[in-house]
Image (cartoon, rainbow, N blue to C red):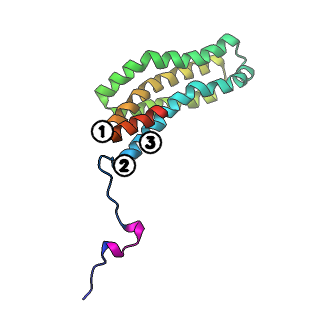
Amino acid sequence: MTTMPRAADAPPSRISRPFRPGSPPPAAWLVVALACAGQFLVVLDVSVVNVALPSMRADLGMSASGLQWVVNAYAIAFAGFMLLGGRAGDLYGRKRMFLVGLALFTLASLCGGLAQDGWQLLLARAVQGLGAAVLAPSTLTIVTSAVSEGAARARAIATWTAV
């Protein structure tokens, strides 16, 4: 007669470990990590463009005021459309708006990288800001909905805030 192996006989990697009470399952932390990555893109793009300003000036022949608009086009569109992005997430779903914002942001980033003239770059940066305004509110609502209330949610929001 064959006996079934007991859990104690299984190698340590095959034993399922219970979650700590109040701790979200690993899938929830994957969702939190993806939402944080989206937020990281939004925040990073505000500052990383400053590194490329001298190259933009040389390659596109932009003036000092034109370079300022490269920074401001993103910031103005981002700030101006953030409430609309949050409301769109309420109406159409946070996951859908996360994906729409990410796609818009990515497409605008590609267009900005391929820009051959200053106006093309400015337009791409404004569309990037619009994409960020749709993406950013969704990241926080995804984090708060993926993790149940309590200490785990506080850790998830702290992680999002740190990003």
First in residue order: circle 2 vs circle 1: 2
Part of the protein shown in magenta? 8-14
Above or below 130: residue 106: below
C-alpha gap between disc 2 and disc 1? 17 Å
Res 103 seen here? no
Which residue is at 46% across, 17% downward? 79
First in residue order: circle 2 vs circle 3: 2
Most frequent secondary structure within the magenta stretch: helix
**Element marked by disc 2:** helix
Q: Report the residue marked by disc 3.
A: 33
Q: Report the residue marked by disc 2.
A: 27
Instruction: Please tell me whether mark 3 or mark 1 is closer to you in this view.
Output: 1
Which residue is at 33% across, 47% downward? 23
**Element marked by disc 1:** loop
Amino acid tagged 1: Gly
Q: Quadrant of the N terminus?
A: bottom left
Which of the 4 image quadrants contains residue 3?
A: bottom left
Which residue is at 52% across, 28% downward? 43
Q: Residue furthest right?
A: 58
